[in-house]
Amino acid sequence: MAVTDETLMQQVKQGDLRKTSDLFDRYHKQLYNFFVKITFDRDLGHDLVQNVFLRMIKYRKTYNETKAFKSWMYQIARNVYADHARKNKVLGADLADVEQVKTYLARVDEKMVQDEREKLLYISLFRLTPAQREILILTRFQQMKYEEVAKIMDTSVANIKVKVHRAMHKLRETYLELEKI
């Protein structure tokens, strides 16, 4: 029987920092994908994942074993990204120019943008607000349940459903506009 994430984190909390490597093995790819889809920068994605695990170790005493580990970890990930965005003024940036977005996407791994539709999808995703992009990445790409996302964002499931609906509507609208170009 596999050891649960919560048990591993409890061991880390109690001082067995070697167990962090087990959690890293389980979650580094998911976190990396989350950050790459939010930042469109692979190198930055690696850095932000490292920062998440450093913070997990630093703040291990704050982990509440009655809560889901994954929610706690994604709260840290959101804070890591928010700190990065604040330091680099990313949240205020609006790269609406399609040519500028295409240039930005050139750095994204070719596997992510294999065909034209996928490119349009990623450009459309990039044109969303950071909050809209984040909610879609968590629910659609990370395939998290609304309940998990509600815990991460400290809001209600109904609020998450509304935000996902609005973000999907905006994504669809943007995609169809780009498809006409």
Image: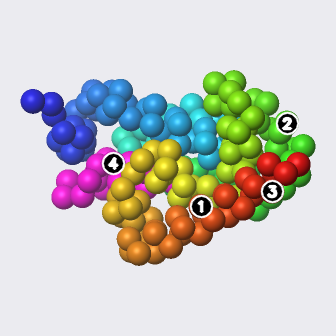
How far is the residue under mark 4 from the one under mark 3? 36 Å
| Sequence-first disc among 3 and 2 | 2
Q: Nearer the viewer, mark 4 or mark 3?
A: 3
Q: Nearer the viewer, residue 178 or 21?
A: 178
Q: Residue at x 64, y 30 (%)?
A: 112
- Badge 3 marks a residue whose secondary structure is helix
* 92 up-or-down from 81: above or below: below
- Tell me the quarter of the image containing the N terminus: top left
Circle 2: residue type: Thr
- The residue pinned by badge 2 equals 103
Question: Compared to 18, does 33 lie above or below?
Answer: below
The reply to whether callout 3 and callout 2 are in contact (CB within 8 Å) is no
> Sequence order check: which comes first, mark 2 or mark 1?
2
Q: Position of residue 28 (x, y in %)?
A: 43, 32
Q: Which residue is mark 1?
A: 168
Whole-percent x, y for residue 114 in the image:
68, 27
Q: Which residues are magenta?
A: 59-78
Q: Which residue is mark 4?
A: 70
Secondary structure at numbered mark 4: helix
* Image quadrant assignment for residue 94: bottom right
Q: Characterize the local packing of mark 2: few (<14), some (14-19) or many (20 or more) Cα atoms within 10 angstroms.
A: few
Quadrant in which residue 90 is drawn: bottom right
N-terminal label among 4 and 3: 4
Whichever of callouts 3 and 1 sits on the residue coming sooner in the sequence is: 1
Check if mark 3's residue and mark 1's residue have beta carbons within 8 Å: no
Front residue of 60 and 139: 139
Q: Secondary structure at mark 2?
A: helix
